[in-house]
Amino acid sequence: MSYIIDWQAWATLGTGILAVGGAVFVGLRQADIQGRQVTIQNRLAGIEELKLRQALFEDRIEVYDATREFLAQIVTHAAVPGLSKNDNVEVRDADMRLQQAFIEAIDRSRFLFRPSVSATLTDLWKTAVQINFHQKMQGDRFGAEDHGKHVDGEFRELKKVQAAHADLAAIFGDELTLSAHGATFAPKPTADETQ
C-alpha cells in the first residue's frame, strides 16, 4: 500500500483550514468589539442621564433659591419685595428683581416639581399679596377698628410665610436631591394631588 502525497490537495485543505480559522478569529474579534461598543454606549447613556439629572437639579435649585430669597426678605423686613413702598431706588429695583424671580419660579415649578409644590408657591404669593394689602390698609385714613383688624391680618399672614420659610425643604421634598430617586424626570403625584 503505497500512499501518494498530493501536495495540491494538502495545500487546498491547509488553505481551507486557515480560512476557517481566520474567519472564526475575525468573528470572535468582531463580537468582542461589538460587546465593547455596547458597554461604551451604556456608559455614554449613563453619563447623559447624569447630565440630565444635573440640569434638572440646577433648574430646581434655582426655583428653590428664588423662593428662599423672596420669603427671607418678607420674614426679615415684614415687607413684600416689589409690592411694599420703598423710596430707595436701588432697594426698590432689587425688590422688583426678587419679586420677578419668585413669580418666574412659581411658573417654572409647574414643570419641575410635583403639582403640590406649584400650588404651595402660588399660595405663598397670595399670602404675600395679602400682607401687602393689610399693610396698605393700616393707613391713617381708616378707623382704629379697621387698623387693628389689618394689623392682626398682617401678623397672621406673616406667620404663614415664616412657617413656610422655616420648613422650605419640606415644601420641595426629595425632589431637591441629586440622588437617583430625587432628580426624577416626571414627578409622580400623590393620591391627594390627582384628585
Image (cartoon, rainbow, N blue to C red):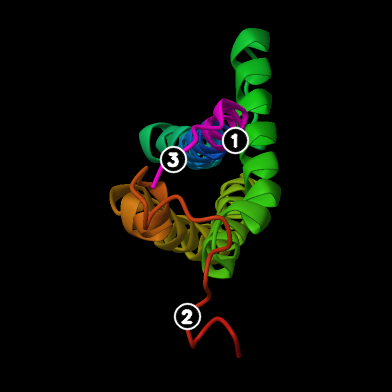
Confirm whether residue 61 shows in the render: no
Question: Would residue 68 appear left or right of 56 to someone viewing this image?
Answer: left
181 and 34: which one is in front?
A: 34
- The residue under the point 47% across, 41% down is 35
Q: Name the residue under label 1.
A: 9
> Is 116 located above or below residue 44 in the figure?
below
Residue 19, image quadrant = top right
In the picture, the disc for residue 190 is 2
Q: Mark 3 points at which residue?
A: 3
Label 1 environment density (alpha carbons within 10 Å; few <14, some 14–19, many ≥20): few
Q: Which of marks 2 and 1 is in front?
A: 1
Q: What residue type is labelled 2?
A: Thr
Instruction: First in sequence, mark 2 or 3: give its number.
Output: 3
Instruction: Determine if the magenta segment contains residue 8.
Output: yes
What is the x, y in percent for residue 122?
62, 59
Q: What element carries label 2?
A: loop
Q: What stretch is highlighted in magenta?
A: 1-15
What is the x, y in percent for residue 15?
58, 30
